[in-house]
Image (cartoon, helix red, strand yellow):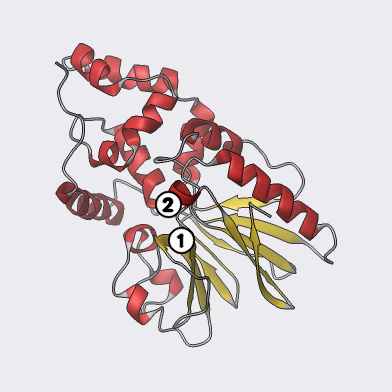
């Protein structure tokens, strides 16, 4: 009987804290921040995908059609959580790690990508990523992680080599290079949120990727600058205390929404249109 590979959910908070401490130290460089071009006329922000590649492809077609009738440069920004929970995590990473055809896109890092990258560097049977959907994501790459650990538990070098063989190098490089924040003078785009009252250039990666409270109840506390984020499921897309959440629970509903931000205001587009 293979050992259990589902860590208790109570360990997830401890893992986030440990990963945060690592991110804050010198061993893991801070993820890039992106300053968006002032020439952009339209931005399309997409919430958590979670392996729903078919919905993402449909939404990309809807966005491309919408952008084709709008003036000036446009950009799609994906807010992270491309893997885990959904049916096609490996295919989603493969799609996003390739150069975009047509409308340019910028992919930000979510907490699931950070957890996956941490596992690939420090794999373990009790790694919390496995309980966040990592078992299913590894299975999408042809890896039965319980069998692998049972076979190679005394050969960590072979385990790391097997993971490197199964997951293409360009996808691992994609995970490592994902920025944590993109911003212009009106909007800040992140996966989870920000630490209230802290300037964008002083935000920590762990808050940008993992925070819920006090951000959800207080907002960024920056005045007029608005944070667009995913991570926390919302039933409606609306401006609340300086933030707009656009995670519509795709791993349960199968639907993805995009928030269009332009000179004519805000508008939502759906993968089910």
Say left or right for 245 vs 184: left
Observer-nearest residue: 147 or 26? 147
Observer-nearest residue: 167 or 146? 146
Q: Is residue 186 above or below residue 273?
A: below
Q: Residue at x 76, y 52 (%)?
A: 64
Q: Residues within 10 Å of mark 2 (few under 14, many from 20)?
A: many
Work out which residue is located at the far bottom of the displayed protein and give it.
223
- The local secondary structure at tag 1 comes to strand
Say left or right for 205 vs 239: left
- The local secondary structure at tag 2 comes to loop
Residue 151 image-quadrant placement: top left
Q: Residue at x 40, y 22 (%)?
A: 164
Q: CA distance from mark 2 to mark 1?
A: 9 Å
Residue with the mark numbered 2: 110
- Residue 181 drawn at (x, y percent): 49, 61
Which callout, 2 or 1, points to the residue nearer the camera? Answer: 1
Residue 97 image-quadrant placement: top right
- Residue 168 drawn at (x, y percent): 50, 25
Observer-nearest residue: 62 or 27? 62
Observer-nearest residue: 147 or 35? 147
All told, the count of numbered labels is 2
- Residue 9 drawn at (x, y percent): 19, 47
Residue with the mark numbered 1: 230
Q: Residue at x 29, y 75 (%)?
A: 214
């Amino acid at each position: 009987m293979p050992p259990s590979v589902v860590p208790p959910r109570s360990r997830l908070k401890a893992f986030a804290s440990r990963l945060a401490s690592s991110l804050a130290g010198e061993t893991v460089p801070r993820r890039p921040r992106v300053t968006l071009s002032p020439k952009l006329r339209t931005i399309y922000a997409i919430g958590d995908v979670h392996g729903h590649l078919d919905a993402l492809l449909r939404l990309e077609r809807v966005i491309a059609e919408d952008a084709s009738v709008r003036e000036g440069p446009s950009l799609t920004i994906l807010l992270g959580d491309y893997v885990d929970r959904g049916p096609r995590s490996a295919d989603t990473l493969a799609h996003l790690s390739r150069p975009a055809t047509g409308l340019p896109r910028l992919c930000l890092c979510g907490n699931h990508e950070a957890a996956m990258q941490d596992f690939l560097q420090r794999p373990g049977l009790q790694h919390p990523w496995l309980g966040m959907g990592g078992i299913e994501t590894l299975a999408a790459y042809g890896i039965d992680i319980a069998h692998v650990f049972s076979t190679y538990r005394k050969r960590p070098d072979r385990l790391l080599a097997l993971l490197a063989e199964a997951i293409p190098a360009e996808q691992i490089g994609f995970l490592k290079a994902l920025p944590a924040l993109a911003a212009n003078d009106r909007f800040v785009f992140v996966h989870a949120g920000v630490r209230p009252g802290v300037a964008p250039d002083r935000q920590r990666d762990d808050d940008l990727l993992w925070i819920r409270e006090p951000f959800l109840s207080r907002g960024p506390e920056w005045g007029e600058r608005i944070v667009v984020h995913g991570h926390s499921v919302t039933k409606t897309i609306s401006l609340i205390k300086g933030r707009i959440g656009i995670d519509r629970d795709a791993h349960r509903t199968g639907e993805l929404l995009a928030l269009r931000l332009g000179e004519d205001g805000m508008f939502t587009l759906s993968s089910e249109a």
